[in-house]
């Protein structure tokens, strides 16, 4: 069994029963989509495993120590690069700005292209979902998020796009990301 196959099984078990926001699709669909996107930019199985696992620490009871023990130190580092401190002492609505700024600061200082692949793969999948949901829900889509202000959402996704452009701007994934930014946040 490859590390990617092991990560897929691990993620399926960890996210069992979870659904994607605004969808009836199982959460694993997001992880698979993000992993396929990453596979257009790298063949490194540790990176692909990290993309498959990128939400397990944030959304399940799995810890970074679990990831390191089951996979590798590097996979755990990649997962950690996109894992937000959920600040359990406050609601997600209250901590949204703090969490997003901290995440962006972490991305800004990273010089590891693989960290950027993990980020782009996840965020492109998110933008695709937002675009689909926007077609169905219109402006009401923003009421389904912890941050309901589309201008703040636009700031977050645009900043990520800017930070990824230098290393990944020549990829089809980044070009799609950039196009979706214009579609999702037109007029914002």
Image: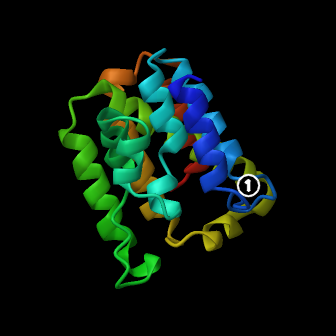
Residue at (30, 37) in percent of width and height: 73
Q: Nearer the viewer, residue 90 or 77?
A: 77
Q: Position of residue 143 (x, y in %)?
A: 63, 73
Left or right position of 1 against 91: right
**Image side of residue 176 versus residue 77, left or right:** right
Q: Nearer the viewer, residue 158 or 48?
A: 48
- Looking at the rendered structure, the secondary structure element under dot 1 is helix
Count of all numbered marks drawn on residues in the image: 1
View extreme (left): residue: 109
Please tell me in which quadrant of the rendered image residue 68 appears: top left
Which residue is found at the position 42% from the left and 39% from the top?
A: 119
**Label 1, on which residue?**
133
Percent of width and height locating residue 57: 44, 57
Q: How is the image coloured?
A: rainbow
Which image quadrant is residue 163 in?
Answer: top left
Image point (57%, 34%), residue name: 6
Task: Give left or right: position of 139 versus 152.
Answer: right
The relative height of residue 87 versus residue 76 in the rendered view (above or below) is below
Above or below, 104 relative to 44: below
* Mark 1 crowd level (few <14, some 14–19, many ≥20, 10 Å Cα): some
* Quadrant position of the N terminus in the picture: top right
Q: Say if residue 125 shows up in the picture.
A: yes
Residue at horizontal 45%, vertical 60%? 58
Q: Nearer the viewer, residue 87 or 124?
A: 87
Q: Position of residue 59 (x, y in %)?
A: 52, 62
Regarding residue 183, the answer to whether it shows in the image is no
Give residue 86's position: percent from left, percent from top: 38, 69
């Amino acid at each position: 069994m490859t590390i990617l196959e092991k990560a897929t099984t691990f993620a399926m078990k960890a996210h069992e029963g979870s659904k994607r926001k605004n969808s009836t699709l199982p959460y694993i669909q997001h992880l698979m989509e993000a992993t396929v996107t990453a596979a257009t930019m790298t063949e490194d199985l540790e990176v692909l495993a990290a993309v498959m696992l990128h939400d397990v620490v944030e959304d399940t009871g799995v810890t970074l120590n679990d990831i390191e023990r089951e996979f590798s130190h590097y996979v755990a580092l990649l997962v950690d690069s996109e894992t937000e401190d959920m600040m359990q002492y406050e609601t997600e609505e209250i901590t949204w700005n703090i969490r997003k700024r901290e995440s962006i600061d972490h991305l800004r200082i990273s010089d590891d292209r693989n960290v950027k692949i993990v980020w782009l793969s996840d965020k492109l999948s998110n933008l695709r979902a937002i675009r689909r949901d926007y077609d169905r829900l219109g402006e009401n889509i923003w009421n389904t998020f912890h941050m309901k202000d589309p201008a703040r959402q636009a700031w977050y996704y645009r900043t990520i796009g800017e930070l990824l452009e230098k290393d990944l701007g020549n990829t089809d994934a980044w070009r799609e990301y950039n196009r979706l930014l214009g579609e999702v946040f037109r007029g914002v």
